[in-house]
Image (cartoon, coloured by chain):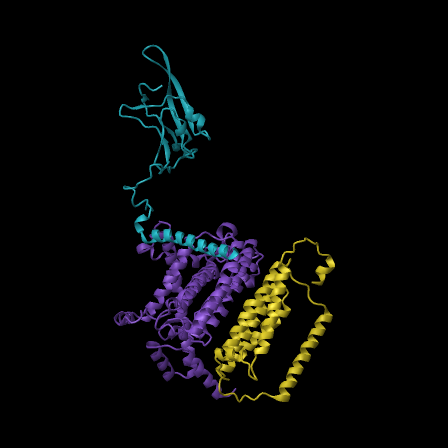
Amino acid sequence: MFLKEYISDVYNGITSLLKGMRQTGYYFFHPKEIITEQYPDNRATLKLADRFKGEVVMPHDENNEHTCTGCTACELACPNGTIKIITRFDITPEGKKKKAIDTFIYHLELCTMCNLCIQACPSDAIKMAPNFEHSVYDRSKLTKKLNLPGSKVKEGIE
Amino acid sequence: MSHEKAINDLKIKSSMFSLEGITSSLHQWLYATLSPTFALLAECVIVILLAIALFAALGLVLVLMERKVAAHIQIRLGPNRVGPGGMFQTVADTLKLIMKEGLTPDKADKFLFNLAPFIVMIVAMLLLAPIAFAKGFQIWDINIGVLYLSAISSLSVIGILMAGWASNNKYSLLGAMRSGAQIVSYELSAGLAILSIVVLSGSLQISDIIAAQENGWWLFKGHIPVIISFVIFIIAVTAETNRAPFDLAEAESELTAGFHTEYSGMRFALFFLAEYINIFIVCAIGATLFLGGWMPLHIGHWEGFNHIMDYIPSSIWFFGKTIFLIFLIMWFRWTFPRLRVDQLLNLEWKYLLPISMLNLILVTIIAIFGWHF
Amino acid sequence: MSASAIIFYVIAAFLLGTGILAVTAKKIFRAAIWLLLSLVGIASLYFWMAVEFVAAVQIIVYVGGIVVLIIFSIFLTQQSGREMPGPSLQRIIFSLLAVVFGLAFTHKLIIDHGFDNAVSQPFKVAVSDIGLQMLSTTEHGYILPFEVVSMLLLAAMVGCIVIAMKSKQTTIPSPQNTEEN
């Protein structure tokens, strides 16, 4: 019984090692599999994965409208105070008060790209952009205002 | 000692330098123009210069090869900036290492600390002597070739132990202890694997072992037992050269760099170079014992095929086989994770040693009854 | 002086120098390293005499085996880096006397008997001859000592295993017993 176990140990060991070597050998002999991006050279044609998280942006459509209602769910979700939302109350044509954002402040220098704000957003107003060239000469340039000047919330978003 | 004996001695020693073609004509020319003593000295100088040139070239080529192989196995590109395809990366690295300051720790044993890298390097140089690089191109065809190799290679552990102790650093000492335990135990199965070829060839001399493989390499002639001993040999020498998956002696994540933690500059470069020289040497031994050294590939009675193979120079055969084995060892390194120290010793004492002992008996039976091809 | 003689004297000087350093070194690890170098010197003397097999065995057994074990045991002892105190005067006197006596004894042997250097032919023995002689059963064969030595080694190995084996019952050894060992 001992001998049988011993031999099966040796056999399993060798086959599992060979399995690993087959995979790495496949990679070695197939240079097409190489995923290295030679970054500064291929800046024009650089392709990043869809799930790459570089910074938080707020998409605006052609009418300069976004979908942020100013609910501050993202601000509450952020673990290190990266987002600060300043709200104001607009008067609708019917004479009602409606909450809207005045300034969406995003501190890129504090952000860890954890994606919690995007998950917390009920109206998909913000998303992660594959943008990673963040170096600037002054730290204050990293504090960004995400809503464009003069933008307003899209109709029908509550 | 009489004068006659001295001359006799020199003649014997000079006949050990068996060289062919260019080398033999150079030999004759030297002996015709100079007195025997100076001719021998001149030959020594030439051999030393060739060895140093080989070391430098090997260091540059093998380090680049390692980095390229590692990159391609890990789906990366590797060094590709210095020179075409990154070819001069190692030259740049060497220049950097030469410029760096060689530090010695304050409370280190300075003499031994400085001696250790040279011991490791001298051992690597001594191991070069009996290796046949091409037909008739061998520094010293000593009659105990294989025994000499295993004897001298057991010296390299001294350099490592010395470096680890003299650094006065706990990581270095731990690395040296691990390396010592590892080398001492894996030497056994490497020796038994070598012995199986010695049993088949019936000689310890490298030239005899190569001559015995004229009609086929031992790996193909010796049935399954020789294949088993080849596998054991490769595993054991990977462990003896302290390479992954057996690189516990310099495990970066646990011991910073093991026995060479405190070394910098040129002394570190010597350790680094010695690692690659040792890989080359053990692969050259493997190629000589199992793959026929400089012998071309011959298959049975295919006269035409054998004839074509004979046209390829013997040095290309030797270096081709050696580089193939080096590639194999690099392939291991970048595929397998590091072993734990108890797993390492289990592998040797519970698996490799019993298997290689049994295997040696099988090989002996094959050799006695002449069952090999 | 021929080149061969020069090489001999270089090796001899190396051997004696490292030997003296091995006994006078203050640090135990250094003493081990000097011992190792002097053993390497003996091996190189064998190489000089063109008895390669003996030289290789010298390196494997003494340098690769015994000295490595000594170094290991030094590593495992405490305070291996400390400088040891010098020996007492009594010890120095007696060891010097022993050295002088040994030197005189050897010198007398050499003077009385002499060694003729008539060996003009270098002595060449194939390794296979050594093996055959070792296992030959004829008058000058070494089969009996060979087998006796192998039995001794087997006994030593069994003893090692017995010492290293974990005993089932945990008995705490008394201090007297450990001192004896």
As drawn, A104 above or below C161: above
Residue C166, horizontal then vertical, whole percent: 63, 56
Q: If the image is split into quadrants, where does the C terminus of chain C sit?
A: bottom right
Chain B colour in the picture: purple
Residue pushed farthest left? Answer: B304
Chain letter for the part of the structure drawn in yellow? C
As drawn, B24 above or below A6: below
Task: Give B123 or A64, whichever is nearer the viewer.
Answer: B123
Residue at 47% x, 75% y is B144
Residue at 32% x, 54% y is A29
Chain A colour in the picture: cyan
Number of callouts: 0
Residue B32, horizontal then vertical, whole percent: 36, 84
Residue at 63% x, 87% y is C111
Residue A69, horizontal then vertical, whole percent: 37, 21
Residue B73, horizontal then vertical, whole percent: 37, 52
Residue pushed farthest front? Answer: A1
